[in-house]
Amino acid sequence: MEVINRYIYAVVKQLPQKERKEVEKELHILIDEMMEAHPDITEEEKKAKRVIEKLGNPDRLAEKYRERERYLIGPGYFNQYIYVLKIVLLAVFLGITIASFFGGMGAIGRSHSVSTIVTNYIGTLLEALLQGTAWVTVIFSIIEYKKVKLSKEDSWSIKELPPVPNKEALISRGESIFTIIFSAIFFSILYFSPQLMGIYYMSNSTLVNIPIFDIQALNRYNIIIMLIFIVTIVQESLKIIWGRWNSKRAIIHSVISIVSSGITIMFFSTMSIWNSKASEALLRRTGFEISSVVNGIVMVIVLVTVIEIATTLYKGFKYGN
Amino acid sequence: MEKSKEQELLESLTLELRRGTIILGVLSQLKTPQYGYSLVVLLQEKGMNIDANTLYPLLRRLEKQEILISTWNTEGSKPRKYYEMSELGKSLFIKLCNLWIEINDMMEKLIEE
């Protein structure tokens, strides 16, 4: 009967190919048996409908016939999936950020557009993050489907229990990510289009720019710029991976900070990198000598570094262990 | 008609309780061959209200686990699939029955306190 065929098909189409024929045969017979048990209703059509109603939603029935749960990534593998996903996303984020600095942004940089640099970076980053997520998800779905054995069944030991984290010792991940993004953008501009950084003013209704850096002199220090950038990235990445401070990490971080701040201070103090035209303009309009401005910058860097080191060491020693 | 919270909870807890008894109940009637719907009726007569849409997939699963064996009866106008316990099934059944008595005793003690 038509309605019976439709019902059985609705159930069976949800089952794997191998099971379909048998279950179809079985259901035909079972429905017939149930029909026989209703001698009270004479109309065949009506009888069939009553029986089918008793069997209920074909989706639920198919569920019961199915051998395995329908999970894309089931509870058994989900934790590992999330763990791997976090690592992959972090790696992709760092990779794209660094690659954009050295590669693609260079080309765009020459067209002088800061917004292009930024939008390009964000676009590439988004695309790469999505790709990474897709691949990890696909691989884990396959693992789920094949029910691959991943780790030893449920083994744990008391020794491996990590200490309860003290909120004060936590490292802000958002801060580190922000620092990485900001550094990538800043250093790209500095490396590829330093002429953008300058004093802008209107002269005869046109926008004039006096770059604060002597471009040719600056280019000689490109390696230093790259070095500072890499050290910054490494520092922030370490912070993200660590998650929380302890005394050892605080010391490592402080040493790196001292080194990188030292290099930065030496860099800024090299008078040749500053554009003499800009210094003249500065002197003319504000009365400040370029050397005093540089001293000011140096003092700010020293101050910020000292505060940061002190805070980190304090957190690492007091709350970390 | 809205179910009260207690009613809802009672329904779901009853379902859980009953679920534990289904397989033992089904096996108990399969010492001799039975076919699909007749088993439903038989269990209902004895007080176990199991739906056809639960029983049929269950029988199939038990057969795959080799707890039941099936034979086709082609006499008569319609072919019928008969199920009964295999030797493995019968052995498991006896052990489960003993276990059931143990559990029953334990529960009675717990409830009476």
Image (tube, coloured by chain):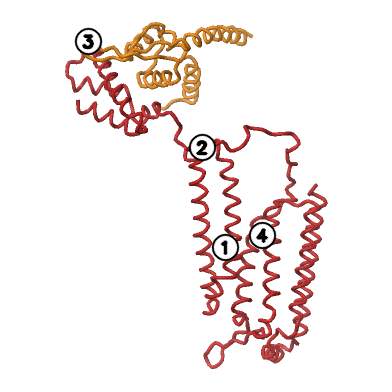
Residue type at mark 2 is Gly
Which chain did the renderer colour red?
A
Task: List x then y, in percent, for residue A16.
Answer: 37, 33
Residue type at mark 1 is Ile
Task: List x then y, in percent, for residue A113.
Answer: 53, 77
Chain to which mark 4 belongs: A
The residue identified by callout 3 is B76
Colour chain B is painted in: orange
Q: Looking at the image, tell me whether mark 4 or mark 2 is earlier in sequence order.
A: 2
Residue A212: assigned label? none
Which of labels 4 and 2 is toward the front?
2
* Distance between the alpha carbons at the discs numbered 2 and 3: 47 Å
The residue identified by callout 2 is A74
Compared with B7, B33 (above or below) is: above
Taking depth in this image into account, of A213 and A47 the one nearest to the observer is: A213
Which quadrant is the N terminus of chain A positioned in?
top left
Q: Looking at the image, tell me whether mark 2 or mark 1 is earlier in sequence order.
A: 2
The residue identified by callout 1 is A96
Residue found 18% across the figure and 20% down from its top: A44
Q: Are marks 2 and 1 on the same chain?
A: yes
Compared with A198, A264 (above or below) is: above
Which of labels 3 and 4 is toward the front?
3
The residue identified by callout 4 is A176
Chain to which mark 1 belongs: A
